[in-house]
Image (cartoon, rainbow, N blue to C red):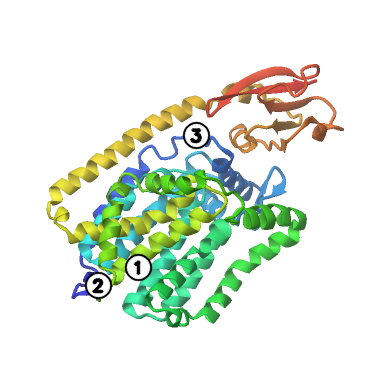
């Protein structure tokens, strides 16, 4: 039996729980929405949400008149709901779902740590996960990774209720929450199932896997996940097969597609930096959990360790590597570190620990102020916006972040890969590109910056 189960009321420690959430809200919320959306990834879901608010395309949001089939629309729905009171998707409203999702992630981490290791660990884990570099940064982002991570953590919380409290009915919540997570980023939402299968095999063998109520779980997943995928395949069959099935699933999740020496070290670097600075303590926590593996009271240690290892391995072997893909590692990593700290002499010096946390939080805030100022200086589009104020002619982006321009210029800007795609379009035609598409026929009108790169608005009259 874990320390968190010994004679404590479910409501005990609520005051510290509230303090952690309040501190996290202040940490995540200062200057919320202050940083520009400077990449297509950051602008994609806000653009989908803008189409939902403007045109009501809830099931298949469009970008530049084309349905966005690469990812399910849950995160776009959340952005649209956050923007509903004002009726406008802005740089500020676009990050509200991630901000709220990060608070939910902190709350779930507190609860899971409390169940695994006791009340003190719940407080420590909440403070740690809130100040990991990954959670802090992505709590202020418009990408859907925080929504995905919240769904994964919620599904794992349901499994904790099954494993530690014997609540068999929580299996339904586990599969249901996993299905909802799939609506954030597709198959990545199934990660909790992989984690739990690994845990059952490591602790109970195949006998544990057979207790997972797989039949009911599969039925729940089919009911929750299949409708959108079937609709997307029906509406845009060729695009769906090309962009989703082949590019996103078969290539993106194929571990053999991008074999290289750097792939050995890249995942380790991403894991260390997304948990930074607490990743410096992770080796000690892993050693502690491994040494306690066979003890009867180490259910929490086993679960947190297997959870961490499984998430890291699954993300590390995928062909597509991005730093933010490792965000789901922050919760189990924080659980491990919190369990270790609350079990040793370090946590007895609470004033020192609180001071250390305050230093980490202050450092993150100062770093965010610097990065925001730098990125905002590097993205400047007012000159191009003024030049297009009274222009209704077709506008395209050539080898440029078309979604960023579309978001800030307030008009659809399709991407083209070469001038041949513009044949048959009568002048005037405008193109945003770094260099002139055709010096003999296009002249410069205005210029701007995106992430420090110069882009020019070219005109063919």
Q: Is residue 233 left or right of residue 447?
A: right
Query: In the image, residue 125 lies at what x, y percent?
Result: 28, 56
Q: Nearer the viewer, residue 258 or 362?
A: 258
Tell me, yes or no, if residue 317 can be seen here. yes
Seen as rendered, the residue at the extreme right is 424
Mark 1: secondary structure: helix
Q: Is residue 198 above or below residue 243?
A: below
Nearer to me, 383 or 130: 130
Look at the picture and state if 84 lies above or below 313.
above
Residue 381 seen from this side = no
**Which mark, residue 15?**
none
Residue 160: image x %, image y %?
36, 71
Label 3 vs 1, first from the N-terminus: 3
Up-down: is 89 above or below 425?
below
Residue that numbered label 3 is attached to: 36
- In percent of the image, x 62 and y 26: which residue is there? 385
Counting residues from the N terminus, which is met first, the one under dot 2 or under dot 1?
2
The residue singled out by tag 1 in the image is 303
Which residue appears at 59% of the width and 35% of the height? 404
Q: Is residue 104 left or right of residue 90?
A: left
Residue located beneath label 2 in the image: 2
- Expressed as whole percent of the image width and height from the top left, the position of residue 178 reads 50, 67
Q: Is residue 65 above or below residue 185?
A: above
Q: Residue furthest front?
A: 261
Task: Return the disc, 2 or 3, that comes first in the chain's sequence.
Answer: 2
Figure quadrant of the N terminus: bottom left
In the image shown, does 422 or 281 lie closer to the viewer? 281
Q: Secondary structure at mark 2?
A: loop
């Amino acid at each position: 039996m874990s320390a968190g189960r010994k004679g404590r009321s479910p409501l005990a420690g609520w005051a510290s729980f509230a303090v952690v959430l309040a501190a996290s809200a202040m940490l995540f919320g200062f200057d919320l929405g202050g940083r520009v959306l400077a990449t297509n990834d950051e602008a994609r879901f806000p653009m989908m949400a803008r189409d939902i608010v403007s045109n009501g395309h809830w099931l298949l949001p469009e970008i530049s008149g084309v349905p966005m089939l690469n990812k399910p629309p849950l995160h776009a729905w959340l952005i649209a709901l956050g923007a509903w009171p004002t009726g406008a998707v802005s740089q500020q409203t676009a990050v509200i779902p991630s901000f709220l999702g990060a608070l939910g992630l902190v709350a779930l981490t507190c609860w899971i740590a409390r169940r695994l290791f006791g009340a003190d660990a719940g407080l420590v884990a909440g403070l740690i996960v809130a100040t990991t570099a990954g959670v802090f940064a992505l709590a202020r982002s418009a990408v859907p990774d925080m929504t995905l991570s919240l769904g994964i953590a919620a599904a794992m919380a349901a499994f904790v209720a099954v494993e530690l409290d014997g609540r068999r009915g929580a299996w339904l919540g586990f599969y249901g929450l996993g299905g909802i997570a799939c609506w954030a980023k597709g198959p990545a939402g199934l990660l909790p199932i992989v984690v739990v299968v690994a845990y059952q095999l490591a602790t109970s063998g195949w006998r544990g896997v057979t207790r997972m109520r797989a039949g009911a779980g599969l039925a729940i997943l089919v009911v929750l996940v299949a409708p959108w995928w079937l609709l997307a395949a029906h509406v845009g069959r060729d695009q769906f097969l090309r962009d989703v099935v082949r590019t996103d699933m078969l290539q993106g999740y194929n571990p053999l597609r991008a074999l290289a020496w750097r792939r050995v070290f890249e995942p380790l670097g991403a894991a260390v930096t997304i948990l930074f600075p607490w990743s410096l303590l992770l080796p000690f926590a892993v050693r502690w959990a491994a040494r306690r593996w066979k003890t009867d009271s180490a259910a929490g240690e086993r679960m947190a360790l297997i959870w961490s290892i499984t998430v890291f391995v699954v993300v590390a072997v995928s062909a597509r590597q991005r730093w933010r893909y490792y965000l789901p590692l922050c919760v189990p990593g924080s659980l491990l570190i919190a369990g270790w700290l609350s079990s040793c002499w370090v946590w007895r010096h609470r004033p020192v620990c609180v001071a250390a946390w305050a230093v980490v939080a202050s450092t993150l805030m100062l770093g965010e102020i610097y990065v925001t100022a730098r990125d905002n200086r590097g993205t400047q589009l007012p000159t191009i916006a003024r030049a297009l104020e009274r222009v209704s002619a077709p506008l395209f982006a050539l080898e440029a972040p078309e979604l960023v321009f579309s978001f800030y210029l307030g008009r659809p800007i399709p991407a083209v890969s070469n001038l041949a795609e513009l044949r048959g379009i009568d002048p005037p035609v405008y193109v945003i590109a770094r260099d002139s598409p055709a010096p003999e026929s296009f002249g410069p009108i205005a210029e701007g910056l995106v992430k420090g790169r110069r882009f020019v608005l070219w005109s063919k009259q």
